[in-house]
């Protein structure tokens, strides 16, 4: 690995001067032929790839209005140019959202517009040649599909939609990214992104049960495949063993235990994440999502609850009903998945569980809004509930809570730098630099308020930050889940008045 | 000759816009992708789009200077169009008179705003990087339209009666003699060029903003199953 340089932490986010090609060497690995074939993509790059790519492009324009509109209506005003964390971190101009889009739009102009045919280079129309395809592969895998640019665009152009389309086109000509496609392969055959088989999952959960028993003295179960349980909990598979993810897993288990609600995991649908979304492939997204609904039907649960995961929540909240709904076999009161934060906060408000805030008095907490939760979904009934609910839950679990600076939270939140299928080792330099804006905002509240707990609700955010904190000289132990705070604060044992 | 060009451009303009809207609307939105927080109701969406179209609210959040320049340009353009309606309408309605003086000021603010946008595009490295020749050309074209317009007002005033007769003739499909004014002919030609370019370029943003998927969808994926024919 070449240079892995963490930018200096000053607590300020500064917009850099352009450095052409600064992150051109940050390239994903290409998917293996067998992996491609297993997902019904060509094994390797087709001999007539260019024709096929243009054909696919034309097909997607007819299938996605968002793509067709984005190609036509960008005026290149520049509003988005300083909004992408990868641009701010790498200084590479091709990471400016509009420049990333232009990689695709110049091909669109050449093949699909009168302007491009008449004016050619003057209108920046270009052929999709080997070089440009190479840039597509580089820079469409330097976008985490976080939608921060779409929030600021005066026409709502969403680079995530363009990135997804580009990845779909590249997959269709046999030019896929190893990381996302391997994971999709595992999710579709084994049931989770880690490729953990049923018995291994059970072993891991047994181990977690023992750990809880050792630490609390209470028998708290993490059941699998229990038919007739009230709740099917679907959580990112990293929760089963990764640190600090597992601390939140323990939190979920304690909540169910203390509230006296029967629940289960499914070894068939042991993954909340849906990487089909990252590659913009409708069919794979649907296939992965369907496992959850099949498991829910088979286990005859009343409702489905989603664990702490950002893009999984988008897939479950925003897309699930379209992909595989309606869920008329669930309890009519709970027709769709509920986020674990909403579920737990509701129990706290009803008094079904009690939290002792003082258990977290050693922490000053701040909260990082995950991009897919913030800008691509909602929690609860209220507009903006995705901001309110996790904060209320955190504040119910601790005494000291601090917000990071305006413009870096809520709908304006910065991506962790590892989302959208980029959480892979070969992109570590990109990930370190892409995290920079978030790290600066965090640094400011560490310095001014002594923040020492960085609360998250996304498995990718958790994995990304624990990995890159040391590059910035910060302790990875600061990183934790919201249900980790709940886990520490929840009062176990007999309920008052029961 | 000018008359023939004018009609040809009008036909191309209308056909171009219509066919573009047909292309847009025949491409579906298979998934719910509003940029959240998003409204849950249709009236909420109308308010959101109104905020984008009238106040440029997303742009305001993104870049205050650009917002000011862009907003002044668009409002000036609107005021100028309203002022011009006295050349197309006979008899001239009362309300058009309201815009006569302010429309002149708008001519100046239009040119100033365009100059700002041009300089900004040229000097901010990030924006310059993504700008093509056409991005600059269209700003210049708009500026030239403004300059020829103001020239007619302040320097060589052509015969307004002739111009109005000519325009009304165009609109009623019974063309009159072309006015004897080079500046006017230039002004009209430049404007026709703008109309000709419009349906084939980024100027389409003026229509596209009204149907932008991320801004027009309600945040109701659970309440109502969203389903399109190809994505069943």
Image (cartoon, coloured by chain):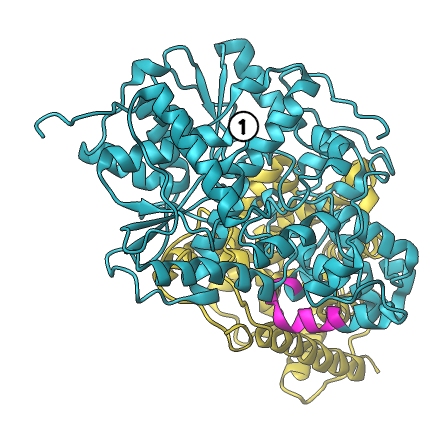
Chain colours: A cyan, B yellow
Which chain letter matches label 1? A
Residue B33 picture location, percent across and down: 52, 57
Instruction: Say if the magenta span includes residue A64.
Output: yes
**Residue furthest bottom in the image:** B174
Above or below, comparing residue B187 to residue A427 in the picture: below
Q: Nearer the viewer, residue B155 or B149?
A: B149
Answer with the quarter of the image where residue A187 lies: bottom right
Residue A176 is left or right of residue A47, and the answer is: left
Q: Residue at x 52, y 52 (%)?
A: B52
Residue A338, relative to residue A205: is it above or below?
below
Q: Is residue A66 magenta?
A: yes
* Residue reaching furthest to the left: A497
B189 or B123, which is in the foreground?
A: B123
**Magenta-tinted stretch:** A56-67
State left or right for residue A476 relative to residue B6.
left
Examine the rendered structure and indicate whether residue A264 appears above or below residue A74. above
Magenta stretch secondary structure, dominant: helix
Please name the residue shown 79% across and 25% down the image.
A4
Residue density around tag 1, few if under 14, some if 14–19, many if 20 or more, within 10 Å = some
Q: Tell me the residue that label 1 is attached to.
A: A243
Task: Say if residue A14 shows up in the picture.
Answer: yes
Q: Viewed as shown, does residue A109 lie left or right of A269?
A: right
Which residue shows up at 68% across the image and 63% down it?
A39
Residue depicted at x 81% and y 79%: B2
Q: Is residue A157 visible?
A: no
Q: Position of residue A5 (x, y in %)?
A: 78, 23
Residue B3 % position (x, y): 77, 82
Dot 1 falls on a residue whose secondary structure is loop
């Amino acid at each position: 690995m070449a240079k892995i340089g963490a930018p200096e932490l000053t607590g300020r986010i500064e917009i850099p001067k352009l450095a052409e090609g600064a992150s051109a060497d940050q390239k994903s690995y290409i998917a293996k032929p067998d992996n491609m074939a297993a997902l019904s993509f060509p094994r390797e790059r087709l001999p007539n790839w260019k024709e096929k790519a243009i054909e696919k492009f034309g097909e997607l324009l007819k299938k996605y209005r968002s793509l067709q509109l984005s190609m036509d209506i960008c005026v290149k005003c520049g509003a988005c140019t300083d909004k992408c964390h990868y641009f701010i971190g790498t200084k590479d101009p091709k990471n400016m959202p509009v420049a990333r889009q232009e990689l695709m739009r110049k091909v669109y102009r050449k093949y699909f517009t009168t302007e491009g045919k008449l004016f050619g280079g003057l209108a920046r129309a270009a052929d999709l040649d080997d070089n440009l395809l190479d840039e597509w592969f580089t820079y469409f895998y330097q976008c985490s599909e976080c939608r921060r640019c779409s929030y600021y665009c005066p026409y709502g152009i969403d680079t995530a939609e363009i990135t997804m389309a580009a990845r779909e086109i590249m997959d269709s000509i046999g030019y896929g990214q190893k990381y996302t496609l391997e994971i999709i392969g595992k999710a579709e055959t084994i049931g989770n992104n880690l490729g953990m088989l049923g018995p291994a999952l059970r072993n891991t959960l047994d181990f977690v049960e023992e750990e809880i028993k050792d630490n609390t003295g209470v028998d708290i179960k993490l059941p699998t495949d229990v038919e007739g349980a009230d709740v099917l909990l679907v959580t990112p598979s990293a929760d089963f063993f990764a640190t600090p993810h597992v601390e939140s897993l323990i939190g979920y288990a304690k909540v169910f235990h203390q509230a006296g609600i029967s629940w289960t995991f499914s070894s068939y649908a042991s993954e909340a994440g849906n990487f089909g979304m990252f590659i913009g492939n409708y069919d794979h997204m649907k296939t992965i999502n369907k496992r959850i609904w099949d498991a829910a039907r088979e286990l005859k649960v009343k409702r489905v609850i989603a664990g702490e995961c950002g893009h999984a929540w988008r897939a479950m909240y925003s897309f699930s009903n379209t992909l595989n709904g309606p869920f008329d076999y669930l309890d009519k009161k709970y027709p769709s998945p509920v986020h674990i934060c909403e579920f737990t906060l509701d129990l706290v408000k009803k008094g079904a569980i009690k939290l002792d805030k003082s258990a977290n008095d050693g922490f000053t907490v701040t909260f990082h809004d995950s991009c897919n939760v913030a800008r691509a979904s909602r929690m609860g009934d209220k507009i903006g509930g995705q901001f309110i609910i996790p904060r209320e839950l955190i504040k119910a679990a601790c005494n000291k809570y601090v917000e990071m600076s305006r413009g870096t939270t809520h709908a304006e939140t910065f991506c962790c730098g590892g989302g959208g299928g980029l959480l892979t080792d070969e992109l570590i330099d990109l990930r370190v630099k892409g995290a920079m804006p978030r790290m600066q905002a965090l640094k400011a509240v560490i310095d001014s308020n002594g923040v020492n707990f960085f609360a998250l609700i996304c498995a990718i955010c958790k994995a990304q930050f624990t990995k890159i904190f040391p590059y910035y000289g910060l302790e990875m132990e600061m990183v934790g889940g919201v249900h980790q705070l709940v886990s520490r604060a929840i009062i176990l044992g007999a309920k008052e008045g029961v | 000759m000018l008359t023939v060009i004018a009609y040809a451009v009008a036909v191309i303009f209308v056909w171009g816009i219509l066919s573009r809207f047909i292309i847009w609307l025949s491409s579906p939105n298979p998934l719910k992708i509003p940029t959240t927080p998003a409204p849950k109701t249709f009236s909420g969406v109308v308010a959101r789009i109104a905020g984008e179209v009238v106040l440029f609210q997303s742009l305001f959040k993104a870049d205050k200077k650009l917002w000011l320049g862009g907003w002044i340009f668009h409002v000036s353009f609107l005021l100028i169009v309203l002022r011009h309606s006295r050349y197309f309408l006979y008899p001239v309605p009362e309300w058009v008179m309201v815009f006569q003086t302010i429309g002149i000021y708008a001519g100046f603010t239009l040119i100033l705003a365009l100059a700002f946008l041009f300089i900004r595009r040229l000097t901010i490295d990030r924006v310059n990087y993504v700008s093509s020749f056409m991005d600059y050309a269209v700003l210049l074209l708009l500026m030239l339209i403004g300059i020829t317009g103001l020239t007619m007002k302040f320097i060589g005033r052509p015969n307004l009666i002739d111009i109005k007769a000519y325009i009304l003739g165009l609109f009623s499909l019974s063309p009159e003699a072309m006015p004897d004014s080079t500046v006017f002919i230039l002004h009209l030609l430049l404007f026709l060029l703008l109309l000709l370019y419009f349906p084939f370029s980024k100027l389409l943003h003026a229509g596209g903003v009204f149907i932008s998927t991320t801004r027009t969808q309600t945040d109701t994926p659970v309440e109502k199953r969203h389903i399109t024919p190809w994505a069943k």
